[in-house]
Amino acid sequence: MAETQNEAPQPTAPGPRLLERIDWSVVGAIVALAAFSYAATVLYRNLEEISWPQVRHTIATFPLSHLALSGLFTVLSYGALVGYDLIALRVVGARQVPLRIAAITSFISHAVTFTFGFGVLTGGAVRLRLYRVWGVDTDRVLGIVMLCALSFWAGLATIAGICLAVDPQLVSALVHLSVPTCRLAGTMILAVIALWLVYVSIRPIRIEIGNWRLPLPGTRATIGAIFVGMLDVAAAASALWVLLPQDLHITMPGFFVVFALATVLGVVSHVPGGLGVFDAVILLGVTQHPSGELVGSLLLFRLIYYIAPVIVALTMLMVHEMRGRSGIAHEDDSTSATIIEPIIPPLAAIVTFSGGLILVISGTLPAHRLWLIRDFLPLPFVEASHFIASLVGTVLLLIANGLAHRLRSAWQLAIVLLLSGAVFSITKGFDFIEALACLAAALILIAGRREFYRKGGVLAGRLSASAILAVLIAIGASILIGLAIYRGVPYDNSLWWEFAYHQDASRFLRATLGAAIIVMFIASYQLLHKAPNISRKASAAELRRAKEIAHHSSQVTAELAFIGDKRFLFSQSGNGFVMYGVRGSTWVAMGDPIANNSADLIDLVWRFKESADEQKGAPVFYQITADHLPIYLDAGFSLIKLGEEAWVNLETFTLDGKAGKRLRQTKTRAEKANIEFEILPAAIVSKFLPALKRVSDAWLAQRGHREKGFSLGFWNPEYVERHDIAVLRHENRIVAFANLWRNTPASACTLDLMRQVPGAPEGAMEYLVLKLLEQAKAEGYKWFNLGMAPLSGLPDHRLASRWARLAGLFFRYGDRLYHFEGVRIFKSKFKPEWRTKYLAYEHGLRLPQTLFDIASLISASARRSTSDGNKEWSKDRAI
């Protein structure tokens, strides 16, 4: 397409700045690891006088009445959580979901989120799975997740503000602020909440991200959400309150504030379940001298409020997935058996990670059932089982990331390791609870075996920051537990080599060393291993095949396939293809698939989406036309308008009459200036390459531009020689040129590269286009495509989408970056018909990243291709 209008279709994706270059997931992982490390250090120092036998005795002799009361408050807290979902469902307009489904979904999603963190991934996946069959789409599920989070924070802030204003003494001592200051802080929190209620009663508010909109609750719904949140937090705090030792003389309002502060810091730290961070704040907040009873209370709270609910939740989810789905409303029987359910991979990753964590921590704790097996299992077998079980647990922690990405190899290895972990748990000390946990995890993986279809290594390429964080915290927690339990054991080098049934400390040291070696090995492999290049250029055979298809296609844009920077995906019939490039995790298809019938086009849209999904990529179709929009919508894509393409109807094009007056004047001035127009056939273009190269270099130098690619051609001798070249000569030298893409005369003709030297006669480019239009009309072409005017034709209305309004600002005021309006004006001189071009994308929240990746692909494509020397072209110049 003409370079003057296609080279800057990415104005809303600015160049990389400092903040854009920062990987915030890595930053979050570093913050979480630092928070966990600090909390672990604080806990280790403050628990120096506490021994594991003390804690174990506290747990074993804890009053059953207090445990039952804590369980009752836990049930009340999780019951209150249902209110979050009920309010959110009504706000997003999903009133068709029954109370029973909302209650089950709320319990499972919150139990999983509280324990494992990453609410959008875990709790969001559960809600997507269970709500979708009731007609709740992905956008509304995302809205529900956000509204539940807002309700939780509103309730937490309210109860913290009230208790802080009533009883600030405990927090005052913890944060080292005066009592009046803490009371003022509580009052200010309540004042902010009151102002918010007043504001939403006056003016409705909604969040907009691209085309995604989320209306925030009004006054009544907000008040209801606050009360639900207060009930949830108060019940959760009470579940811990009743477990605290009786010798702690603290008031309930004061403890509620400490609990709220611990919850906030646990969530902000990004550590799953606030592990370590939450516990450290509670320990330091309620007493200056932690005791074994207090540590036992915190462990029991973790068991009652976190572990027990998540076990019940995962069991319910497993039963739900294994049961027949034929009785669920709004879901077709045959379809439900084959659709890839979004909950299975994250659930498999969670249970596998949990199984690994159980094995790793079990390898740290003292063995209490060795007397059951010591009479019939030799000591070397027990020691080997203990060591191997810890290694198996470590590997399970690492491969859980591969399960989240649906890797078949990770699934196969996880099954083997979980079954092995169950066996070794029995043979290392008859740890039947660990064995049952591993077997349950294996059953869940087996039940969802169809969801793991992707090829690739078990680690899914490079581990994400969150995956690395989770592994480090798990290993760190096991080490911390071991150091705390065996604090009283004097260290000696002989501990590494002592083998006896009662030597738990030695087994802990060896297991920790083995786990550390595995983690370091995997980390080294990740750093040194180069990921496969999924964006390599097409082979000569693929280019030949694409050329044959393009030769019979009416889509003149198929020529973009041959500029040397794309890969191809062919249809099942072999009569169509998608040309695409990859930038980061974004797979960008250039234009509509090249296909001669709708069946191939539909097949290619789905095949491209499947191929991107198999590689964990995000598929997008860039600069598609309006002709096939229903196909993209059916495939689950969203659309935004990129601009409009100028098509000149050659059958009605004329220089006669009033409409052609200005063009006649342009033609007359050019002819008086002795400008000569000529079309060089492709067969002789090679003779003129030096002259054309001088024009191209001068044009680039004048505009301060670098070559761009992907969505348009760039200077490449092999590419330029493929086409007829229209040139303008002035004083016996070439001053401007454009290469032509021609199709059958019944179809269309267009131009791509369009360049001139500085100081060319005024109106030279306009004259060049005019002569091309006349030439194409004389040759019998019906249409001439002048290319796209980026960001033009977008709706200018106060109710238009945020994208349209932002892009409109760029169109009107972005001339310093690119002459958007000037391009539109230039093309309008030829009285074209404007046709809309769109971007089809999947994930609304990922739109900024998608635009940035497309811009980077366009900017870097030409440099990569020219630096590689277009070796594939050199292999077969006949293509």
Image (cartoon, rainbow, N blue to C red):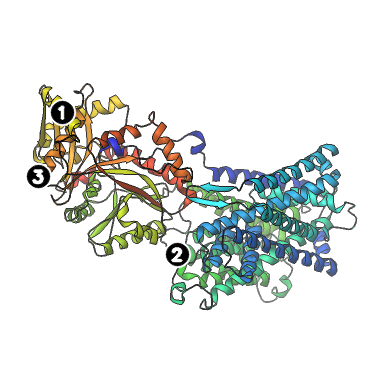
**Residue pointed to by mark 3:** 779
Q: Earlier in the sequence, mark 3 or mark 1?
A: 1
SS at circle 3: loop
Secondary element under disc 2, as helix, strand or loop, is: helix
Q: Nearer the viewer, residue 578 or 43?
A: 578
The reply to whether dot 2 and dot 1 touch (C-beta < 8 Å) is no
Find the distance from the CA under tag 2 to the CA under tag 1: 56 Å
Q: Nearer the viewer, mark 2 or mark 3?
A: 3
Q: Please, what is the three-letter code of the amino acid marked with disc 1? A: Ala
* Residue 691: image tag: 1
In the rendered image of this protein, does residue 313 appear above or below residue 222?
Answer: below
Q: Which percent across, then down, holds residue 806?
A: 45, 39
Residue at point 83%, 62% (across, down): 58
Location of the N terminus (image quadrant): top left
**Relative image position of residue 609 (x, y in whole percent):** 38, 58
Q: Where does residue 522 sit, x and y in percent of width and height?
A: 51, 52
Tell me the amino acid under the disc marked 3.
Glu
CA gap between label 2 and label 3 equals 56 Å
Q: Which numbered disc flags the more N-terminal residue, 2 or 1?
A: 2
Whole-percent x and y of residue 767? 17, 31
How packed is label 3: few (under 14 Cα within 10 Å), some, or many (20 or more)? Answer: few
Given contact means CB atoms under 8 Å apart, are the residues at marks 2 and 3 in contact?
no
Residue 778 visible, this orientation = yes
Residues at marks 3 and 1 touching, judged by CB atoms closer than 8 Å: no
Q: Marks 2 and 1: which is nearer the front?
A: 1
In depth, the one of 830 and 641 nearer the eye is: 830
Amino acid carrying label 2: it is Arg
Q: Left or right of 435: which side holds 557?
A: left
Image quadrant in which you'd find residue 684: top left
Residue designated by label 2: 408
